[in-house]
Structures are given as C-alpha cells and as structure tokens.
Image: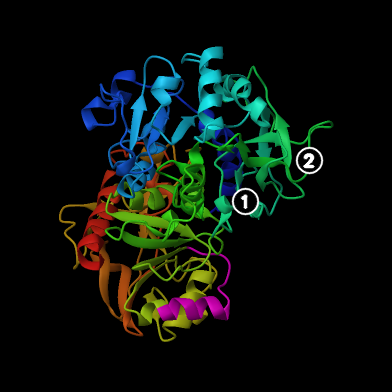
Amino acid sequence: MSISAKASSWLLLAALTLSFAAGCGDDDEPSSPAANNSDANNHGIPANNNPDPEEGTWILVDNIHSQKQNPDLRLMRDNYSYQGMHGYHRLFKHLEANSYPYHQISAGTLTDEVLSGYKILFVNLPSEDRPRFTAEEIAAVHRFVEGGGGLFVISDHSNVYYSADILNPLLVPMGITITNATALERDPNYAIGSAWLKIRHFADHPINAGVTLASFQTGGTMETDAGTAFLSEVGFGDDWNEENLPSRVGNFAWDPGEPEGMLNIMAATTFGAGRVVVVGDQNIFGDEWLLVGNNFELVSNIFEWVGGQEAASPPLRERLSTEYLRVGVDLEHADWNIGSNGCAGYFPFFINFNRTPQIAARGIDRPRGDEALLVYPNIQRELSADRVEEVRAHLRRGGWVFVVGDVVGGRSASWRLVEALAPDFAVEGGAGSVSVAALPSNDAAFPAVFGDDAFPVSAPRFDVSGMKMAAHNYTGGAVCPADIEQAQPYLRKTTSSQGVPFLQAEVDGQTVDLARELDVEGGKLVVFLQSGFWRNETLGSERQQPTRRTADAHKIQYKMLDWMVEELR
C-alpha cells in the first residue's frame, strides 16, 4: 500500500467490497459437465444404483440442476478460478472419511428409483443454465422426504442464476420461501462490507450445537417459521436488481419498504417423516471459507441432522481429520483482515494456508486448544489479559505463534502482544535500538529502501534459494493491488538481536531481518518485523493470479508452509 497515503486504502477497500460483494454471483467460468460426472473418481451412480446402508449415511449430490462448486472442485495452489476456489471438495472429503459416502448424478431426472437407498439429497444452488425441476421431480423429492429422507438445499442472494425461482416450487410446500433479497448488516455486525456477515444469532436447534459464529460471503434471506439463523436487529434485506448482471444484487443500501431486523438466513424443518435444511449462501461451505468461524461445525451438524445421525458420538463436527496441521488465524483482533481484498488485507495470505492440502487453517475468535500454530496478522485490537494468557498456554504446550506486524506506525496491537510475550524484544533501525514499547509513529526510524526489483531472501529453516520478495508502494495513479507490476518494491532496514533469524533479505548490501524466531515459555514465537510482502499489496487480491513481480512471494509462503507441515504436524 502507499506509504504516504494509508488512509486511501479504506476508500479502495470500500470500492472493492462493493464490487466483490456479489460473491456467489461472480461466476465467470462455465461448469464442465464432463468434469462433474464423477465416474472417474468413483462418485458417479453405479449401474446397479444400490447404495449399501452398511457403508454409511449415503448422500446423493444433485448435479442435474446445479454443477457449480460441486465436490470435484477444489482449492489448489495453481487454481484461481472462482468455482475451484469455492468448490466443496474439502467438506465432502470430511464427510466421506466419516461414513457419509456420496454419489453425484449429472444427467437424467430425479425419480423414486434414483433416490431409493439414499438418506440425504444435497442440492447446491441450482442455476438457469441447467434443467429446472420438473413437476415429476418435485413430487419424487417430496415423497423421498416424507418417507424419512433428508434434503439439504443451498440458496443464495438476489435470485442469482434465478435460483429462487427454481427452488421455490420445491421448497414452498415445505414452509420455506427464498426471497430475492441480499442479506445485509450494519456495523458492527458485518465482517468485510455489509454483505460478508458475522452471524451470531441462532435458534436452539441441533444444527447449531457448538456454533457461536458463522459467516456468509454474500447470501440471501428466506421467509419461514422454521428459521435457525438470523440477521441482527439492524440487519436488512436489499431487494435484487434483475438488470445488474451477473449478480443481480441491489444497491447495498436500505430503501423504504425493504424488510429490516432479524430476518431468516437459514432454516430447518420437518416434512412428513423427513427433515429439510436450507442455508442462504453458497460460499459459506466452500474450500475458501469452510474453516472460518464455526462454518465447519454448522455444516457437519446439518448433515448429521438431515441424515438422522445427530446422536452420533463423537459428533461429526469433532471429527476433523487428525492428519491436518491445525492453524488458527485471528479474526476479531485483526478486524477480519484475512477476508479483505483491500490493499492492507491478508486474504491470499490466509487462503494460501488452505491451498496446502495438509493444513486446516481456521479463522478464529480465540484459540481452540488444538492448534499447532496461532497467527495474528497485523492485529489492530489489543488482546485482553485472558486472551494473552491463552496464547501463553499455547506456547507452554510447545506451540508456535506468528505475530505479523510492521515497525512503522507505532505500538499497534501486534507489538503490544509481542511486548506481553517477549518484553525485552527490540528492533534496530536508523535511529538505533528501539524497544517494542517505544516504537515511533512515523517512518523516520525505519526508512524504506526502494529497488527496481524485489530483494533476495534467505531462511535457515526452509530453502528459498534464488527467490526474491518485497513490499510494494503504489504511486502515480497505480491501483492496489491490480497494478502490482507498476508498484515500487521496497523493504525497510530492520534488524534484531533477539532470538535467531527466521526470514531475512539482502537490502542495499545489508542483511535485514524480516522475521525473528524466539524461544518463549517452551514454545516458539516468530515476530515479523515488516509485512508488506504478506499483504494484498504484494500477494494480490483473492483471485489474482501471481505475476512476475509477486510469484516468488507466494512461493516463499508455500516453502514456509511445507516446512511447517513437516516440522509441526
């Protein structure tokens, strides 16, 4: 971000939020029926179509009416497509590993015969480019649920893809009507922009067991007497704009006549002997956002409940694979910057953790106690004494902590956390040694050194030979982060004698510390002295392919993550 005009980043963030908030409607890549016909990975319906109940609670995934963000699509290091980043691969891997096997059907129609033997039908946001439900299919699904089957439906905002028009003939007889509105909140009830929600209002229902925080990436509302999650008292439904393609979202402002208050955004009901759940956002359970807040617990509970397995012990929400390296990344103290596409955000930095298949990086309010690593990315809100003690307890268990800060700007909450954990930590710059308790609010003590290119880096614990990295300054009308190739690479001359080097760079003939590793209370504390190379100003926005200038920064993070998997898992 621009060194001289940090405040301008908030204007950019607002613009990016408005353009990005369409979320699920931002679909620039058509689905591939061939890719979604899962015979190649043994998830297509077999010829005998006879799911064995001894194998578990069988799920049928409806790819007849929707092929977007299905279980075949996954977040990977080289995949920056919208559908891939929000695919449901990780969720269905979890389900399948815990006796919820599934088949996908991508052709034909839903009939009594097709549905026979399955316990759950999963319908993930139908779209106008696929066949609509026929009257015969709707009748077959109703008979399936009335006979004891489970139906789990994903809807979305603003009748995107005409999904509300497609779903309502199926759902209205069950007591749920999808509206054409986008679910919006007013401060402080949103995460990033008014459509990316912090959901904290839940009914007393089995699907909400262990759930205190969920998060939408732009979703919709529904009318029902069976609501299970709600907007806050100051939330509202923003009516659609059919002409605003592809998202069809409205004006992101409340207009007279639009509904306000604790509107329904999820629902659970019974229909005959069966059970029905509808959730009003598609991205909530995709690979990118599944592990934020309690989204994972919520969707695990939903599959258990619609499948009639809510009495299982341990519950599905507690069965996340132990093979993952578990990472907790702070949400509240960092103002949810891990979901921000603005210049000062850390969105790709967070996503890259989960692009690594052996890592489960969660967005957390507070440590859960099972993490190997806690990450505090340039936090702005100071941790309470109780929260600091939780970090210390994590260190005493041998855990690692990354505190990502920047030596300019004074004693941010990141540096107050460092001070609490390592009170003698000091940084050397142009003005000599400065303790974290006395960091100046201006840039003079740690001047930036600009270069024509990024700077060579080294790391004792992982191999970054031949790689370069830098923060970036945007001037002359360059837009952050889109115009990364026009930005000026820079780093600051910062060193520290505390601990040992973790990440260093060669700047103007001097070895500069980017991060130091310290032994603290039996664990490891890594302090990043500067962090522009992890911010969006360098790593780009959520779906921005790495460029010549930024590719090494991504590679360096991946080298660090691969080392962590080997060392900490």
Position of residue 106 relative to residue 174, above or below, is above
Return the residue nearer the eye: 333 or 293.
293
Position of residue 428 relative to residue 366, above or below, is below
Locate residue 124, reporting x and y percent.
48, 31
Locate residue 289, reporting x and y percent.
46, 46
Picture quadrant of residue 507: bottom left
Q: Amino acid under label 2? A: Glu
Instruction: Pick whichever of labels 1 and 2 is earlier in the sequence.
Output: 1
User: Mark 2 Cα within 10 Å, few/some/many (few <14, many 20+)?
Assistant: some
Residue displayed at 27% across by 57% down: 561
Instruction: Say if the magenta span includes residue 386.
Output: yes
Residue 199: numbered disc:
1
Locate residue 329, reporting x and y percent.
44, 61
**The residue tagged with tag 2: helix, strand or loop?**
loop
Return the residue nearer the eye: 303 or 333.
303
- The segment highlighted magenta reads 378-393
Q: Amino acid under label 1? A: Ile
